Structures are given as structure tokens and as C-alpha cells.
């Protein structure tokens, strides 16, 4: 991605050259990469499992999990009712993955 040296806007590719939409600045040289070279430079895509993407804080519970008795759980909050009502707090046991909610 290139930026305009005059106004700082993003330069748009038009044909062989780039130009600025805001101030009409045009590059004097042709773009260095051809389409096939651009395809070769694309980054590889790594697959991330859903389990790897879950990043929730862990809390010590006042009341243990009803399923296994563990005292640690992940938690998150979500607005499940009207905007003027309190949010709902969800818990998920670290050990057995049992999920429950707490209304405020």
C-alpha cells in the first residue's frame, strides 16, 4: 500500500501507475510488481481452531460448578435483554465445560 506524498491519502492503482483520488497526484514510475508476482507474495493462511481462539478471563467462583464442583470458570458478559436493563454474565467451567448464566 502506498500513500500520497502530498496529502497522505492512499494511492489507488490505475493501469500501470498509482494516483491520488484526493489531490490528483500521479506516480511517475510504473508499479514494480506484476500481477503474477503479487500472487506469489501473498501470505499463507493458518487455520485456527475455535478452541484456540477462545480467550476469556478465569475467576474463582463463590459457588462451585453444579456439575463437577470445580471453583474456577471462564466468564463473559452479553446484553441479552433491553438496553436499559443489566447485562447477563455467563460462566463456563474450566474443568467440565458446563455453562450457566447469572442475571444481575
Image (cartoon, rainbow, N blue to C red):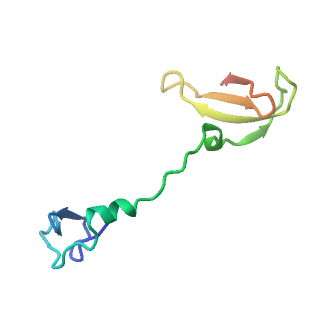
Residue at horizontal 58 percent and vertical 27 percent from the top: 86
Is 86 situated above or below 10?
Answer: above
Is 1 left, or right, of 49 in this rendering? left
Q: Where is residue 83 in the image (x, y as percent from the top left)?
A: 48, 27
Is 32 situated above or below 90?
Answer: below
Report the residue that reaches farthest toward the right: 69
Q: Where is residue 77 in the image (x, y as percent from the top left)?
A: 61, 33
Image quadrant where residue 97 sits: top right
Report the residue that reaches farthest toward the left: 24
How many numbered circles are shown? Answer: 0
The answer to which of 54 and 64 lies nearer the viewer is: 54
Image quadrant where residue 80 sits: top right
Is 29 left, or right, of 89 in this rendering? left
The answer to which of 35 and 72 lies nearer the viewer is: 35
Is 47 left, or right, of 104 in this rendering? left
Is 98 situated above or below 49?
Answer: above
Residue at horizontal 70 percent and vertical 43 percent from the top: 57
> Which quarter of the rendering shows the N terminus?
bottom left
Q: Where is residue 90 in the image (x, y as percent from the top left)?
A: 66, 28
> Which quarter of the rendering shows the C terminus?
top right
Is 7 left, or right, of 67 in this rendering? left
Residue at horizontal 30 percent and vertical 62 percent from the top: 36
Residue at horizontal 23 percent and vertical 72 percent from the top: 31
The answer to which of 29 and 104 lies nearer the viewer is: 29
Image quadrant where residue 98 sits: top right
Amino acid at each position: 500500500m502506498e500513500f500520497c506524498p502530498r496529502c497522505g491519502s492512499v494511492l489507488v492503482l490505475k493501469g500501470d501507475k498509482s494516483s491520488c483520488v484526493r489531490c490528483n497526484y500521479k506516480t511517475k514510475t510504473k508499479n514494480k510488481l506484476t500481477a503474477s508476482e503479487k500472487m506469489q507474495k501473498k501470505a499463507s493462511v493458518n487455520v485456527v481452531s475455535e478452541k484456540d481462539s477462545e480467550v476469556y478471563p478465569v475467576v474463582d467462583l463463590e459457588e462451585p460448578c453444579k456439575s463437577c464442583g470445580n471453583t474456577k470458570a471462564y466468564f463473559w458478559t452479553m446484553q441479552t435483554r433491553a438496553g436499559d436493563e443489566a447485562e447477563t454474565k455467563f460462566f463456563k467451567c474450566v474443568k467440565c465445560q458446563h455453562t450457566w448464566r447469572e442475571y444481575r
